[in-house]
Image (tube, helix red, strand yellow):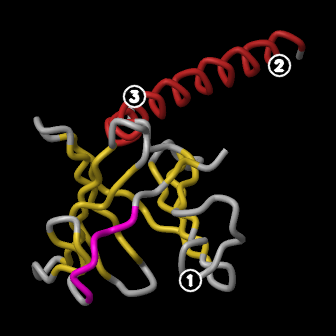
């Protein structure tokens, strides 16, 4: 009986280490990690989450090893799956995210600035409709605000 228990424990330990290394090898998670995106970001980290400058956007490794994009608007929170991540030669992080509440995939580009802040360069739907283009909010033509990493 003890031998079976020891074999089972060893087998589970081996299986667990294989699963851990599989999660660590997720190319999306590794890209996001190397870019420095993991963690919470906000225009103003001192504000409570809201629909304006206090919005908290967080990129996290989920329990399955994939990357989650969580948004906290104070009264509303959601969780979305990052489907793809790639850094272009000019340093732009291109993300593809699925938003289940609106049943839509969106692609957006983020640039890490020299001071460690983050700026949205573009955000578009699958149909190519932009909400952010050339670092400007399409509806207002105002530049996108930089986001700071909140710790």
Estimate how packed mark 1 is, as few (under 14), some (14 to 19) or many (20 or more) residues with alpha carbons within 10 Å: few
Question: Would you name the residue on which mark 3 appears?
Answer: 25
Q: Earlier in the sequence, mark 1 or mark 3?
A: 3
Q: Which of marks 3 and 2 is nearer the N terminus?
A: 2
Callouts 1 and 3 close, C-beta under 8 Å: no
Residue span colored magenta: 140-145
Q: Measure the alpha-carbon separation of dots 3 and 2.
A: 30 Å
- Secondary structure of the residue carrying tag 1 is loop
Helix, strand or loop for the magenta stretch, by majority: loop
Question: Would you name the residue on which mark 2 appears?
Answer: 5
Q: In which quarter of the image is residue 35?
A: top left
Please state which of the two labelled residues, at mark 3 or mark 2, is closer to the viewer: 3
**Image point 24% across, 57% down: which residue?**
109
Please state which of the two labelled residues, at mark 1 or mark 3, is closer to the viewer: 1
Residue 5, percent from left and from top: 83, 19
Q: Earlier in the sequence, mark 1 or mark 2?
A: 2
**Image point 56% across, 75% down: which residue?**
78
Q: Does the magenta stretch include residue 143?
A: yes
């Amino acid at each position: 009986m003890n031998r079976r228990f020891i074999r089972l424990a060893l087998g589970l330990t081996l299986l667990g280490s294989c699963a851990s290394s599989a999660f660590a090898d997720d190319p999306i998670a590794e890209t996001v990690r190397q870019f420095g995106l993991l963690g919470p970001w906000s225009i103003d980290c001192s504000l409570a989450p809201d629909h304006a400058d206090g919005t908290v956007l967080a990129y996290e490794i989920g329990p399955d090893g994939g990357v989650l994009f969580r948004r906290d608007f104070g009264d509303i929170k959601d969780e979305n799956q990052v489907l793809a991540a790639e850094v272009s030669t000019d340093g732009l992080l291109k993300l593809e995210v699925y938003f289940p509440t609106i049943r839509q995939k969106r692609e957006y580009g983020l640039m890490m600035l020299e001071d460690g802040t983050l700026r949205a360069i573009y955000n578009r739907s699958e149909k190519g409709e932009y909400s952010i283009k050339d670092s400007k909010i399409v509806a207002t033509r105002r530049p996108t605000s930089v986001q700071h990493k909140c710790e």
